[in-house]
Image: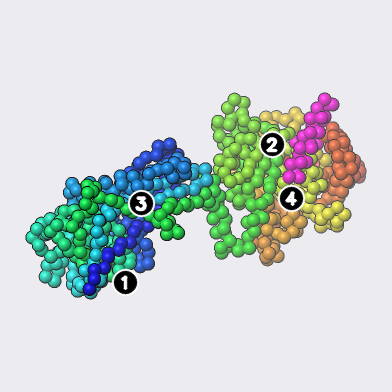
Amino acid sequence: MSATPLQFVPFSSSMDGTFWSELSRRKLVEYRLSEGPFDVGAAYSCGSAAGLPALANLDIGSFGHASGGLKTPGSCPLHGLLYLPNSLADMKKMDKSELLRASGERAWAAACDGGALKDASLLNRFVALIYVDLKKYTFCYWFGFPVVRLPEEVTLAKPPQRLGDVFDDSRLTCLNTAYATLDTPEKRAAFVVVPLGEEVQIRPLEELPTLVADRRPFYLAFSDPSTSPTHPGWPLRNLLALVVHRWGHSLSQCSVLCYRREARHGHVDSSHSLILDVQLCASVTAKGNSAPMYVGWERNAAGQLGPRSVDLSASLDPARLMENALELNLQLMRWRLAPTLDLEAVASTKCLLLGAGTLGCSVARCLVSWGVRNITFLDNGVVSYSNPARQSLYTARDCRDGGRPKCDAAAEALRAVSPAVHARGENLRVPMAGHSVPAHAEEHVQADVRRLEALVAEHDAVFLLLDTREARWLPTVVAAAQRKVVINAALGFDTFLVMRHGVAHGEAGDDSEKLGCYFCNDVVGPADSTRDRTLDQQCTVTRPGVGAMAGALAAELLVGLLQSPLKGRCPASDDAEASGENPLGPVPHQIRGFLARHVYMTPTCAAFPMCTACSRPVLDEYARRGWEFVLQVLNDAAYLERLTGLSRLHEETDLDQVWALSDSEDSAS
């Protein structure tokens, strides 16, 4: 029978996500422009499942640790050198043969000086050539696993045998037990198996010279990463080179045990390991050469010698990672709890927050938690020293040097919370009904009104979170004219109101079923409430928990509204059964909370025909006259009462009764 050439299964590099993440961090913080080489480690196992390639595993533990890589029972180390070229052009220019030779010489030095007999893992080396693009989070990499290229083919005297066909159950059990006592990866890399009657012993590789000299039978054994039924793994190549180098002239044949193990039904099975009868050549180097040649560059997916690439931008960019994590939390709701939840409608909604105080901060944080991606803060105040304790988007640093503009500080803080959010600030004062405008300021105020109108048009939902009642009037009129969704929130000392404004069906539609707005509950027009106020009236005096509760409910009210096919025209309901189409339950018109009694109420109010903000006379006059109408209201709030007919109502009704029925509030956000 002619001798059969012995073929080997090469290593296949395998890097998990933690390896790429740590490599990116080290490239940015530690390695910078240095190209290396840097010491890294990998690991392979003799316990891979059938059909898997011979994996060389790298993970976060690979950096700075020769025994890095995924640890499994029976794992063994590979020692590597990492090169990090700073461009693809530099990577192409690198002398690949020289890199492989430099790594291979380290293994060969251990074979020559006897270090490999004490630690056979020193024969298992690799070189990693990786270009890291930190902007795109793409990696171009090429691994080489250098092995000595013997001048003559290593052949098999006979076909490979399964260990189960050579060893009986007693010897198999004895071998598995002895292997389990090898307590370090270095000892498992290579060892000697010596038969003793019906048993076997595992001896360290250091005893190989004595066994060869005494001509005692033995098996040269190693932990084999290969799962091939006929071919051993890559580590055997350098192990055989070591044997040839030391005993090639006196040892022409060697029995090799390719040890493999797997757990079956709670027991370790190694019967699928291979026994090879290997015919050795006489020398490691060809005539005329003093140093061995090395091979071992990994092939790519096309089966050719060349690099591979991986694009991890979707998983490694911190902003994308945060976005994916938030998306996962939201998607989990749809798995079982709310399968029909329309998260896309929520994420695509552009929200305009008028007011960046206690309510504005609370609403914004809750909207981000729901996956809203576009949030604009409108405010003209600055962060004061009393704000950070109650307003969650500010810190003490925002109060220094007179205070940062709230709109800018809030937007920046929100982007820091979630980089995927497009948050911006608009430093704008909302013109208020009853606050007269001097002639020299009319042009500036008119520009503010136009900017407010444009912002409302750009967004899908408007949150009214302002400090005073009259500040809510103009945004209410503008949003009603543009038929935008409006969520209003106002605070008292231990009470709060959260409500949505009704949305008209159309220009000439039937609005008889339209829900009321914030001003529909009042029979008096908005007026200047800031004049002659004491300190406790100038500041927002509420129980600390009220703002967070109202802010969360305001955001939840919008999300619930977006789940309805009617959106802003969704009828009010507090009947869970009647709102079966909405996965989040009924969508009320108003939520009134009383913290002193821990009571919620959800009343419904129809649109008031004499409302000073959303009634037809007001909207028609606003559409016809525009800025002139707004200016007249700013200078004379009583004009609204005359326009809507409230003044006649006052004349026909006892004034004390009118004020008793009023739903005006002195305190807001």
Name the residue beneath numbered marker 4. Answer: 485
In the rendered view, would you say 251 is above or below 491? below
Q: To which quarter of the image does residue 201 belong?
A: bottom left
Q: Circles 1 and 3: CB distance less than 8 Å?
A: no
> Of tags 3 and 4, which is closer to the observer?
3
For badge 2, the amino acid type reads Glu
Q: CA distance from mark 4 to mark 1?
A: 62 Å
For badge 1, the amino acid type reads His
State which region is magenta: 430-458
For badge 3, the amino acid type reads Gly
Name the residue beneath numbered marker 1. Answer: 265
N-term-proximal mark, 2 vs 3: 3
Please tell me which residue is depicted at 56% across the width and 64% down the height of the picture. 336
N-term-proximal mark, 3 vs 4: 3
> Badge 1: few (under 14), some or many (20 or more) residues near its Cα, within 10 Å?
few
Whether residue 599 is visible to the viewer of this picture, yes or no, is no
Does residue 64 appear left or right of residue 546 in this picture? Answer: left
Q: CA distance from mark 4 to mark 2?
A: 20 Å
Q: Which of these two is toward me, 319 or 614?
A: 319
> Badge 3: few (under 14), some or many (20 or more) residues near its Cα, within 10 Å?
many
Q: To which quarter of the image does residue 644 belong?
A: top right
Please tell me which residue is depicted at 19% across the width and 48% down the height of the picture. 112
Name the residue beneath numbered marker 2. Answer: 426
Does residue 176 appear left or right of residue 629 in this picture? Answer: left
Name the residue beneath numbered marker 3. Answer: 144
Residue that protrudes farthest toward the front in the picture? 288
Residue that protrudes farthest toward the left in the picture? 214
Q: CA distance from mark 1 to mark 3?
A: 37 Å
Q: CA distance from mark 2 to mark 1?
A: 67 Å
Q: Give percent across and percent down for residue 296.
A: 33, 54
In the picture, the quarter occupied by the C terminus is: top right
Please tell me whether mark 3 sits on a helix, a strand or a loop.
strand
